[in-house]
Amino acid sequence: MVQHGGDTIHCDALPWLPLAPQVFVKVIKLVPETGAFSVMIRAEPGGVLPRHKHLDSAEIFILKGEGEHRQTGPYRPGDYVSERKDAVHDALPFHVETELLMICQGPSAFLGPNDETLYLMDVPMLQHLAGAAQDMETH
């Protein structure tokens, strides 16, 4: 029976996909019409999320791990982080295993040494990652 009141996503069944060295992403929800998306991010100790710019706002809920983000401050499980549109964030190293839920209103641009855009984390990129993982499972 199809439910029209919403969707339940079984996140434990979703694969962890590579995002950056020792940093992985689970694609939970994509909204191509608006560019919004929801993902979980897991970082292993030693992982680094590259320098990036939020092209739209994002909300983060820390599920596991602790650390300090240079632009937003210290965080630990249960914390909520609000990231504003056009905010630029330095590379974020992870010293302990960390998991977070991230709800984005639009893309983030991962930046090179001169703040040039190297690639976007956006709906098309996440669709490609999820599709590639699904293709590998079926072959």
Image: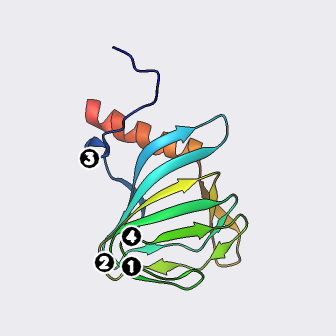
Instruction: Give the residue type that dot 3 points to.
Output: Asp
In the foreground, 91 or 64:
64
Give whichever of discs 2 and 4 has the lower sequence position: 2
Question: How far is disc 2 from disc 4 in space, using C-alphas?
Answer: 19 Å
Question: How far is disc 1 from disc 3 in space, using C-alphas?
Answer: 22 Å
Question: How far is disc 1 from disc 4 in space, using C-alphas?
Answer: 17 Å
Please state, as top left, top right, bottom left or bottom right, where the N terminus lies in the image: top left
Residue linked to disc 1: 94
Residues at marks 1 and 3 touching, judged by CB atoms closer than 8 Å: no
Residue linked to disc 2: 45
- Residue 139 shows up from this direction: no
Residue linked to disc 4: 78
Question: How far is disc 3 from disc 4 in space, using C-alphas?
Answer: 19 Å
Q: Tell me if 123 is positioned left or right of 24 in this view.
A: right
Residue linked to disc 3: 12
Q: Position of residue 59 (x, y in %)?
A: 55, 61
Q: Residues within 10 Å of mark 3 (few under 14, many from 20)?
A: few
The vertical placement of 106 against 117, above or below, is above
Instruction: Give the residue type that dot 1 points to.
Output: Phe
Which is more foreground, mark 2 or mark 4?
Answer: 4
Residues at marks 2 and 1 touching, judged by CB atoms closer than 8 Å: yes
Query: Going 40% across and 83% down the picture, which residue do you hit?
Result: 67
Query: Image quarter for residue 6?
Result: top left
Q: Residues within 10 Å of mark 1 (few under 14, many from 20)?
A: many
Query: Image quarter for residue 14?
Result: top left
Q: Position of residue 83 (x, y in %)?
A: 62, 68
The vertical placement of 18 against 77, above or below, is above
